[in-house]
Image (spheres, coloured by chain):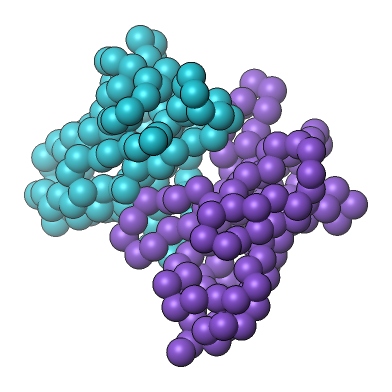
Amino acid sequence: AQSVTQPDIHITVSEGASLELRCNYSYGATPYLFWYVQSPGQGLQLLLKYFSGDTLVQGIKGFEAEFKRSQSSFNLRKPSVHWSDAAEYFCAVLLGGTSYGKLTFGQGTILTVHP
Amino acid sequence: GAVVSQHPSRVICKSGTSVKIECRSLDFQATTMFWYRQFPKQSLMLMATSNEGSKATYEQGVEKDKFLINHASLTLSTLTVTSAHPEDSSFYICSAHAGTGYSTDTQYFGPGTRLTVL
C-alpha cells in the first residue's frame, strides 16, 4: 500500500538557520509529490510539487525540494528560516490508478523557530 | 487564483443536532472535491470524494449515513454531519481539483471548519 513517512514529528531551528524536512514515500509507480504548509487552525497551502522533469523543484516562500528516486525521498529545504515559517508541514503523494486524485499525507512535521 | 472557501469557519452545536459545512471554489469550477478530517496533532484523513452530479465515494470506515455529502454544482459541495456527537468534534477540511487554467493534478484546500459538539 502507498504510504508517506515524515520521520521527524517536531523540529526546532533558530531563525536564519537552514532547514531540511524529511519525507519518504512508498509507491509503486512514479509519484506525484507535494509539500503543504498548515498554520494553526488554518487549511493547507501548497508550497511546491513534483510531477516529472527536473528533480529539484522550487516553491513559494523560498522553499525547494529534491526528488531522489533511489532513496524514495522528497525532502524539503530552505537555506534561511524566518520566524513566520513556524507551522506544520505535510508531505503528500497523489495516488493513481483507480484511486486517482486521492492524496495520502504523511504524519506532519511541526516546525518551531527560535529567535 | 484557485481559492477555496469554507463556511462556517467554526461551529459549536449540541449533541444530536445536524451541522452543514459548505465548500466553495471561488474562481474555478471543480468537478471533484474532497473532504478530510483532521484530529488534533494528527494528519489529514480522507473521508470521501465528492463528484458533481453523482454520489460521493466514501473511504473505508466512514459512515455515509452520518456524513452526507452533496455536490450540487461545479462550485459547491456540502458536508452534513447528522446527529452529531462529541466524538465527531474535529477539524474538517475540503479541497478541490482546479480545472482549466490550473494543474488538474493539484488540490487546493479550504481554510477548514472547526466543529465542536457539546
| Chain A: colour as depicted | purple
Q: Relative to B46, does residue A44 appear above or below in the rendering?
A: below
Identified at 32% across, 48% down, the residue is B111
Identified at 63% across, 68% down, the residue is A78
Residue extending furthest right? Answer: A70
Residue B78 in which image quadrant: top left
Residue A20 image offset from top left, x and y in percent: 67, 70
User: Does residue A5 appear anywhere in the picture?
Assistant: no
Q: Which chain is cyan?
A: B
Classify residue A80 as left or right of residue A65: left
Residue B115 image offset from top left, x and y in percent: 22, 50
Classify residue A79 as left or right of residue A115: right
Residue A70 image offset from top left, x and y in percent: 90, 52
Q: Nearer the viewer, residue A27 or B83?
A: A27
Identified at 50% across, 48% down, the residue is A46
Residue B24 in which image quadrant: top left
Residue extending furthest bottom? Answer: A115
Identified at 60% across, 76% down, the residue is A80
Residue B87 image offset from top left, x and y in percent: 29, 52
Q: Which quarter of the image is occupied by the N terminus of chain B?
A: top left
Residue B104 in which image quadrant: top right
Classify residue A2 as left or right of residue B114: right
